[in-house]
Amino acid sequence: MERLHCVGVNIGTTFDASAVAVAFTITLLAGISTGIGGVLVALKSNPSNRFLAGSLGFSAGVMIYISLMELLPGGIDDLAGVYGDRGDLYGVLAFFGGVLLIAVIDRLVPEPINPHEFPDEGGRLQASTTMMRAGLLTGVAIAIHNFPEGLATFIAALGDPTLALPIAVAIAVHNIPEGIAVAAPLREATGKKWRAAGWATLSGLAEPLGAAIGFLLLMPFMGPATLGLAFAAVAGIMVFISFDKLLPSAIATGAHHHCVYGVIAGMALMAGSLIALN
């Protein structure tokens, strides 16, 4: 992912309408690719426990890898550029601040709709409320993550659209499993596959939304310190959701080996996309 501080764009520059339109279109296409993941889930009729475990594990692998290998290091780099040696400390504090934030939100949910056990009848996952919450929380975390990502892509496209195209393609590739992360638990919880795909698409629209709001309102105030804290905190949120929601839900299906295979596959795909991006 191309981070804001790495893009040589003067944010005080005035851009013509065509340049803004091209940059926004590139960002929009990258963002809505989460819908492809949702469609893949929707087209899978009567998903087996193996598919569910594998897809949830895959999603967790993607989120854990990008959090620990891209978002957190990127946030620390941004903060180090501002605060020097204290950047590491502030990045770690922001990471665990994100963990604490989502953990507090999770604990504030009333117990009847926040079960901590994952009942299993005949090998099928039955905790629909847990799956619903997993999908919605994942969608929120991905939307938060996509917001600054969209802003970074947009600024890169303003500076050089030919550079932004491969960036957008790589982001689109790793947005597909993010769409699966949202749609898979929502489909399992509600049985409404296309609505789940719609929610997955909606989470990706945070990227063009981040671009639009950033361009109109935030760019004069957005600096490396703000982005660094945001990246590190979002990494903490995504890691917490992976370990607290996605992986327990996947293991509860009974197909725990497929969960592990999915985690490794998700990490491998994300590693490949980030290498291609760099």
Image (tube, helix red, strand yellow):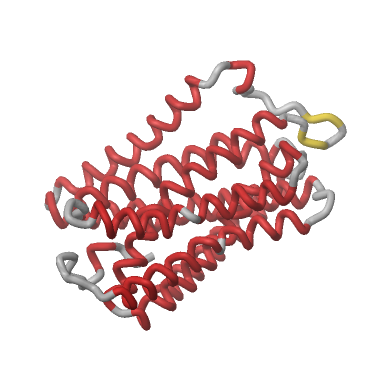
Residue 28 screen position, x and y as percent: 47, 65
Q: Looking at the image, is 235 positioned above or below residue 133? A: below
**Relative depth, front residue between 201 and 213:** 213
Residue 87 screen position, x and y as percent: 19, 48
Tell which residue pokes out farthest to the front in this image.
17
Q: Looking at the image, is 167 positioned above or below residue 263? A: below
Left or right: 32 as drawn, with respect to 82: right
Q: Which residue shows up at 53% across the image and 21% down it?
A: 109
So how many labels did they put on this image? 0
Residue 73, by quadrant, is bottom left
Q: Which residue shows up at 42% across the image and 66% down it?
A: 27
**Relative depth, front residue between 254 and 276:** 276
Left or right: 93 as drawn, with respect to 132: left
Q: Which residue shows up at 76% across the image and 44% down it?
A: 255
Pick the quarter of the image with the C terminus. bottom left
Pick the quarter of the image with the N terminus. bottom left
Left or right: 261 as drawn, with respect to 217: right
Q: Which residue shows up at 42% across the image and 47% down it?
A: 144
Tell which residue pokes out farthest to the bottom in this image.
162
**Relative depth, front residue between 73 and 198:** 198
Residue 269, by quadrant, is bottom right
Tell which residue pokes out farthest to the right in this image.
122
Residue 42 screen position, x and y as percent: 74, 54
Left or right: 44 as drawn, with respect to 148: right
Residue 100 screen position, x and y as percent: 38, 30
